[in-house]
Image (tube, coloured by chain):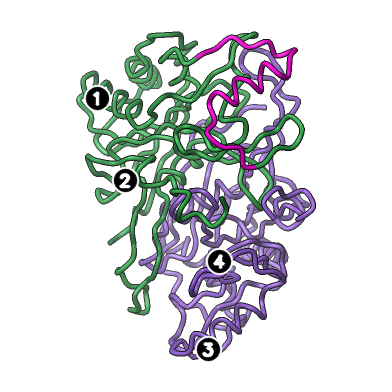
Chain colours: A green, B purple
Amino acid sequence: MSSPRRLEVWGVTGIGEVTRAADLAGMIADAVAGQGDELRDRDVVVVTQKVVSKAEGKMVEVDVSDPRAHRAVVEAESVRVLRRRGDLSIVETKHGFVCANAGVDLSNVEAGWAALLPDDSDRSARRIRDGLRARTGADVGVVVSDTFGRAWRRGLTDVAIGCAGIAALVDLRGSTDSLGRELHATEVALVDELAGAAELVMGKADGVPAAVVRGGPDWWFRPRTSVREELVRPPHEDLFR
Amino acid sequence: MSSPRRLEVWGVTGIGEVTRAADLAGMIADAVAGQGDELRDRDVVVVTQKVVSKAEGKMVEVDVSDPRAHRAVVEAESVRVLRRRGDLSIVETKHGFVCANAGVDLSNVEAGWAALLPDDSDRSARRIRDGLRARTGADVGVVVSDTFGRAWRRGLTDVAIGCAGIAALVDLRGSTDSLGRELHATEVALVDELAGAAELVMGKADGVPAAVVRGGPDWWFRPRTSVREELVRPPHEDLFR
């Protein structure tokens, strides 16, 4: 199994404000064209949760001046609270993600509104992938990303909450290291590393809701993939729930 | 604060086998030159822990046929065991990292030997950075990376265990979102996202121990940085210890 030797990663600017029922795939394709480029087979398009949620109408009104109102929205999205400190709740969402405040997001959202996570981010990724193929003919991978905290380490990183056409996990078990010994338990969370790489060219403050990663090898890509099925660790095998 | 619009990420091939007291910076500079390129100011050079540990002689003999021998090495590197399941121990290392088996690594290492984490990976990164500057004149950022698991999500990602010249955390608090509202608590773990992006071009099986990320903006870079001081979450503020 060989690795890519060179990747290009760039932010897709000029997408504009995304509203309910927007043709997000079309907007991304137009914006890439506006950058003088066009999507190619085996490009990976990373799209932030926020614009996916906006396009899918996953917005709720919330009185931010009332902490209880925000907490009520968070609790409605949660199946389990792991930890709580002040306004911060670390919860398991109904989708199975463990994150702060159930991913309910007030930034880059109209005042008085909050963006919820998509109902099924893998399906969202498949829709965007199909839309991009219909629009451009390119067979791309799509990752829907969100910004999560982690246990044990400060700072947030972007991770994948949905994917289509690109492997969520790359299993290197059974391949050998450079000294010919078998590698054990080396399942790399490919789509999380792609989401983080995309964040490097997005920037929270800039309203760049999509990025392209070009140069990935053929073995990254496969038709049937899922963050929820491959990457979300079931509670029964999780040592930290 | 503006973001980079385009990054190039490539694996540095042709570094060769790294042995004790090897001039790692010189080997990296030569290998980049062998690729027909040369390091520039504000490139980020990501180097895997394994070759840093090899160059620093952080190797111990271990009889892999004896699980107790491996566990003894892990315990010597640990200050606290968070969880244990079979051969797997999730521990806090003496450096403060929470990871599996204290980062003690048997792959890509001579049979009968294990690679331990560097004593001070930030210092390791500073040495490599100074060596690269002396050798090439380029003022680069350096990240020392390792492959860690996570709570709640399957799969491993590469993260930073040391850095020099590049901000470990980028604090976007106080900057405003694209709708002009202040962003709260958006500290991005820049060096972790860079380590993950670098892993995408390394590949466990290929013995590519370094990568270059080119195109980062000026505000990523500063002289005094530290993974241990900025990124490692002290137990007293950690909700999951």
* Labels 2, 4: one chain: no
Q: Nearer the viewer, mark 3 or mark 4?
A: 4
Seen at 30% across and 68% down, the residue is A175
Give the percent coordinates (x, y) of residue B157.
49, 54
Q: CA distance from mark 2 to mark 3?
A: 35 Å
Could you classify mark 1 by the number of other residues whose Cα lies within 10 Å: few (under 14), some (14-19), or many (20 or more)? many
Eyeballing the image, is A126 above or below B99?
above
Q: Is residue A158 left or right of residue A166?
A: right
Say which element carries label 1. Answer: helix
Chain of the residue that carries numbered disc 2 in the rendered image: A
Question: Residue tagged by mark 4?
Answer: B100
* Labels 2, 1: one chain: yes
Where does the magenta region start and end?
A59-82
User: Where residue B62 is drawn, which disc sits there?
Assistant: 3
Q: Nearer the viewer, mark 1 or mark 4?
A: 4
Question: Residue tagged by mark 1?
Answer: A130
User: Where residue A167 is drawn, which disc sits there?
Assistant: 2
Q: Indicate the quadrant containing the N terminus of chain B: top left, top right, bottom left or bottom right.
A: top right
Say which element carries label 2. Answer: loop
Could you classify mark 4 by the number of other residues whose Cα lies within 10 Å: few (under 14), some (14-19), or many (20 or more)? many
Q: CA distance from mark 1 to mark 3?
A: 52 Å
The verdict on residue B67 being magenta is no
Chain of the residue that carries numbered disc 1 in the rendered image: A
Amino acid at pointer 4: Ala
